[in-house]
Amino acid sequence: MDAIARIKQLGMPRRNDELWTFFPVSKIPAPEFPDACACEEDFSDEKDFAALLPIASNARTMVQSIADNAEEIAMLKCNNDFGRTVLNIGKNAKASIEILDNKVLHPICAERFDVNVGEGADVEIFFANPANDLPLAFRHFRITQAAGSQVRFASIERGNGISRVSIDDFLNAPGAKFECRTLNMLGGTAESHHRLHIYHNAPETTSMQLSRNLLDGSSRASYDGSVIVGANCTKALSSQLVNTILLSGDSSVSVKPVLKIYHDDVECTHGNTVGELDAEQMFYLVSRGILQETAKRMLMSSFAKETFYPLPDSVGKKRLLQVLA
């Protein structure tokens, strides 16, 4: 089934759809599709409207390949409303991929990234774009990982509109590791929504999720993270933690952790904290002569930077911390 047929079969996202629980689906404009789908792939198993939208709109597919054992730094940017990129990362390759925003204002933008990671490859994918006014932006990542591969996904979002980042990661062989670190710094009426499905399809695979939010004004964030561990996947390790600081009484966060575990020899954890800036830390700083606004900025900066400090030294980590500086 092609993408147009599948997206019409699914219909527009609805609030009772578990993939769109927290998203303001009424703000998604009804798309107009071409008469025929240019892509001949079978999408009958795809369930996410946002993952299908660029393909059903006949976005031109850009294919990038990184050879075995190669080391590359790349920047990707979609120049149209809809875009699709296929990345093939070779065996034992090292790649740093930065994703840049499309700065042209459109009612809706949607991008899809299919990332195929070879055995032993080490890949970082990150974005930390300046605040933008894109009204509605979707980014979907479909990542497949071979044995011993490592993928680190990291992002900072500061837009003024509504954004949704969705990730399907498939840990298909022993030793595969996936790490996701996201930071939302939102104000006004901005919204940021994350939806992750991590599939542990082999034994001795590891996933880690850390999401942090600094929310002001009447901004909203949501995090919908699912971990699925297969029946024969012994020694799988998974952790998920969401930390949120609400800077105003009108800001809000919604979190939905989901664990589907079909084997008992695994270690899977999840946690969620929501609060304000620490009053004791504020008092400590102010009592030593630091202005209250300066103390507030110091605590916010520390909270944000701690999201990315554990990352190994790389182009991505340097860029993320540079943005926060």
Image (cartoon, grey):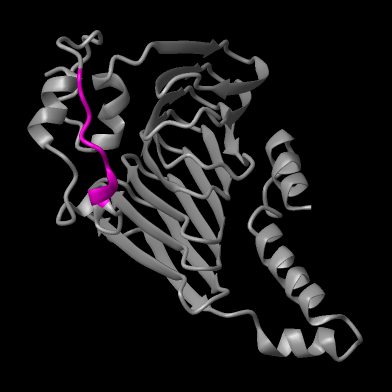
Q: Main secondary structure of the magenta part?
A: loop
In the rendered image, the vertical position of residue 175 relative to residue 242, given as above or below: above
Q: Is residue 30 visible?
A: yes
Q: Is residue 312 magenta?
A: no
Q: How many marks?
A: 0
261 or 100: which is nearer to us?
Answer: 100
Q: Residue at x 45, y 12 (%)?
A: 62
Residue 119, position as x, y percentages in the image: 49, 24
Q: Residue at x 51, y 27 (%)?
A: 104
17 or 189: which is nearer to us?
Answer: 189
Q: Residue 67 lies in what quarter of the image?
A: top right
Residue 174, position as x, y percentages in the image: 42, 37
53 or 136: which is nearer to us?
Answer: 136
Q: Is residue 31 magenta?
A: yes
Q: Residue at x 37, y 42 (%)?
A: 166
Q: Residue 39 lies in what quarter of the image?
A: top left
Q: Residue 250 lies in what quarter of the image?
A: bottom left
In the rendered image, the vertical position of residue 203 relative to residue 62, given as above or below: below
Q: Is residue 313 visible?
A: no
Left or right? Give the position of 317 relative to 114: right
Left or right? Give the position of 251 relative to 306: left
Residue lying at the far left of the rendered structure: 9
Residue 74, position as x, y percentages in the image: 64, 21
Q: Quadrant of the N terminus?
A: top left
Q: Residue at x 43, y 62 (%)?
A: 220
First to last magenta residue range: 25-33
In the rendered image, the vertical position of residue 296 relative to residue 310, given as above or below: below
In the rendered image, the vertical position of residue 293 relative to residue 97, given as above or below: below
Left or right? Give the position of 117 relative to 72: left
Residue 151, position as x, y percentages in the image: 53, 36
